[in-house]
Amino acid sequence: MIERTLGIIKPDAVRAGNSGKIIDIIEKSGLEIVAMKKISLSKDQAEVFYEVHKDKPFYDSLTKFMSDGKVVPMVIQGDDAIKRYRQIMGATDSSKAEKGTIRNLCGTDIEHNAVHGSDAPETAKDELGFFFCGYELI
Ligand code: CDP
Ligand code: MG
């Protein structure tokens, strides 16, 4: 089934100049980037985006990190896109991510892991709506 998922190139990867490399990995995998932009998140905006993690010990540090530099949100589309994009991202902890995955190649640790990806159809819909408005999602 054709799906859409939200990807984000996180500030660590943007700062390191890895945006192009990450876009290349996504496109070579056969997934299509149908919309994309480069923006800054405020701490408040990052807190809303990651609200699901508000009780986790890493919430404050994560939202500081995500608001400390530009990010590149992307609408990624393809057959089974949610699962396929999670596969090319690799495990959350970059030091344990499978060889050749984005987090293995571009991430540093469990927090600074280069990319975000939605984890299910419902969260994908919410997260796409957080960054992209109606006309951008056509
Ligand atoms: O991003 P993913 O869905 O793989 O992981 P998550 O469990 O939804 O966590 C969201 C983000 O929080 C991760 O991508 C990490 O940047 C960060 N995190 C962290 O800093 N420390 C942890 N122990 C777990 C996650
Ligand atoms: Mg997650």
Image (cartoon, rainbow, N blue to C red):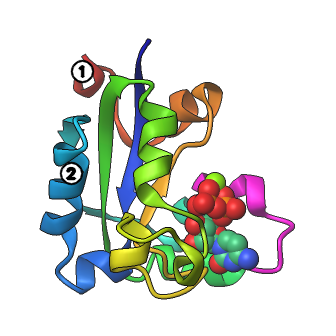
Q: Quadrant of ligand 2?
A: bottom right
Foreground pick, 59 / 13: 13
The image quarter in which residue 104 lies: bottom left
Q: Does 73 appear above or below 110?
A: above
The residues colored magenta run 47-58
Q: Of helix, strand and loop, which one carries label 1?
A: helix
Q: Position of residue 82 (x, y in %)?
A: 49, 34
Q: How many tags in the picture?
A: 2
- Would you say 137 lies left or right of 65 here? left
Q: Is residue 57 left or right of residue 131?
A: right
At 59% from the left edge and 26% from the top edge, which residue is drawn? 121
According to the image, label 2 marks what residue?
A: 37
Q: Quadrant of the C terminus?
A: top left
Q: Amino acid at mark 1?
A: Tyr
Q: Looking at the image, is 114 positioned above or below residue 138? A: below
Callout 2 secondary element: loop
Q: Nearer the viewer, residue 11 or 113?
A: 113
* Mark 1 neighbour density, 10 Å: few (under 14) some (14–19) many (20 or more): few
In-image side of 22 versus 104 (left or right)? left
Residue at the location (76% across, 61% down)?
A: 53
What residue is shown with label 1?
A: 135
